[in-house]
Image: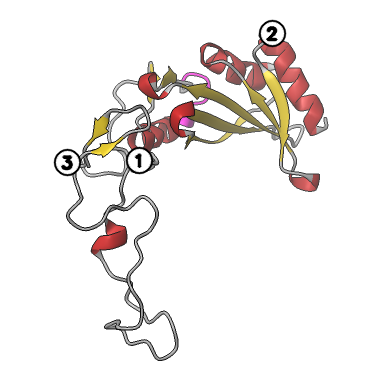
Amino acid sequence: MEAEGVGRRLVELVADEAAVAGISGGQAYARATVDVPPARWRDALRAARDDAELACDFFDWLSAVDELDGGFDVVAHLWSTTHRHGLLVRTRVPREAAEVMSVVDVYPGAAWHERETYEMFGIGFAGHEPLRPLLLPPQFEGHPLRKEFVLASRVAKPWPGAKEPGESVAGGGRRAVRPPGVPAPGEWGPTPTPGGGGGTH
């Protein structure tokens, strides 16, 4: 089945007028994408697994994209080992209520990915309890893949090598430039979030 047909088939199965099919990539890398409302997230993944025409029996990965004021896109990539096609299923959750249903009962392999996405983006997965820490130390505060999160390591540790021929490791050639979003030294502390609230890191 071509990528367009894969997307259309899942939209038919979800039977929700808010579900929209599309294509990601092109030529040999084209993948069907289907955007579904958060309430149909688990139903969509179950339909992709159980439908004979889709037969997406392999769970590849799950992650998220921070769309700032738009919220978060939660994305799952599925694969059919029988029909040799892939499928990206996406849903968008609001920033102030970042939660979607867990799909561990549909694809047990999603457990690791849901835990990582919770840690890195702060997105909850209802029904996956407890969402235990996976990669970060217990004392870590914040969610490092949110776009408002300041990565202090960008300014705390200088680049060890010379940047231009003749420039010494000790520097002296150029003025240090901070990466985008990194505050000047002495400006650490609460940072504004896209919603207008404050956050600490």
Would residue 71 be visible to someone looking at this image? no
**Is residue 51 or residue 14 the one in the foreground?**
14
Would residue 160 be counted in the magenta stretch? no
Q: Look at the picture and state if 9 lies above or below 27.
A: above
Would residue 108 be counted in the magenta stretch? yes
Q: Quadrant of residue 121?
A: top left
Q: Is residue 198 left or right of residue 123?
A: left
Q: Percent from the top left, x then y, of residue 124?
A: 37, 23
Q: Is residue 50 left or right of residue 171?
A: right
Give the labeled residue for mark 3.
139
Q: Percent from the top left, x then y, of residue 178?
A: 34, 61
Q: Residue at 28% across / 61% down in the picture?
A: 155
Quadrant containing the N terminus is top right
Q: Amino acid at mark 1?
A: Glu
Q: Look at the picture and state if 146 lies above or below 92.
A: below
**Is residue 198 or residue 115 the one in the foreground?**
198
Question: Tag 1, which secondary structure?
Answer: loop
Quadrant containing the C terminus is top left
Bounds of the magenta segment: 105-110
Give the labeled residue for mark 1.
148
Q: Percent from the top left, x then y, of residue 181?
A: 36, 50
Q: Residue at 24% across / 34% down in the picture?
A: 199
Q: Which mark is residue 15?
A: 2
- The reply to whether the C-beta atoms of the residues labelled 1 and 3 are less than 8 Å apart is no
Q: Amino acid at mark 2?
A: Ala
